[in-house]
Image: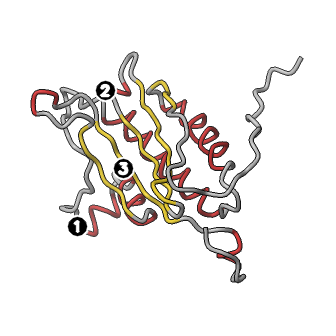
Amino acid sequence: MNIVPRPRAPFHTPTPPFAGRRWASRAYPGDLAQASWVREDLRADLYRIEGLCSDLTDTVILCASEMFSNACDHSRSGQLDGRAIRNLFMPDAHTLYVGIIDDGARTDAPTFPHIPHQRTVTDWEEAERGRGLLLIDHLATRWGSRAVVDFPFCAGLGTLVWAEFTLTTAADTTGSTGAQV
């Protein structure tokens, strides 16, 4: 009997991208140890897009992993019984949208996701943390964050951090004249 967990194999045949494509939202316990499942599930879902460039797949997975880690570190998602929810869809045939919803702001550190712009070059060189959103800002076509519910009396119920990526195919990155997805 094998006791080593095996990665989940994709079981769907890849299909061409199309506008309005949605994947089921996935909820994960707000534990950093779950980041590997977030990455594997996302890789399996992205496998379903025909011709998706492997570099873009890795970029989307990296950014989603950063968003999940931030949710665990900076929100109630990382506390007892906390969770984070991953969303994935295509608003049009050329754009992939991934988002992570956390359980809301912690009372000990009620902050909204932002890139720390007040740091000096020396501060950035010495900082051990705080580069996740900067990484997403550099790799994604667009990104942002917003409250899950936009009512003042519902503040703190959760934050959505999202990123959009322009789809490229493997043919686009090798210089072939294939159709762009």
Frontmost residue, 67 versus 129: 67
Give me the residue at 64% from left, 46% from top: 43
Tell me which amino acid carries mark 2: Arg
Tag nearer the camera, 2 or 3: 2
Query: Where is residue 31 shown, x and y percent of the image?
Result: 47, 27
Mark 1 to mark 2 CA distance (whole Å): 30 Å
Residue picked out by circle 1:
120
Tag nearer the camera, 1 or 2: 2
Mark 2 to mark 3 CA distance (whole Å): 19 Å
Give me the residue at 47% from left, 37% from top: 86
Relative to 122, is 63 on the left or the right?
right
Q: In the picture shown, does residue 53 fall above or below 149?
A: below
Q: Residue furthest front?
A: 19
Q: Name the N-terminal-most of marks 2 and 3.
A: 2
Q: Name the N-terminal-most of marks 1 and 3.
A: 1
Residue picked out by circle 2:
76
Relative to 141, is 158 on the left or the right?
left
Tell me which amino acid carries mark 3: Arg
Mark 3 Cα shell of 10 Å, populated few (<14), some (14-19), many (≥20): few
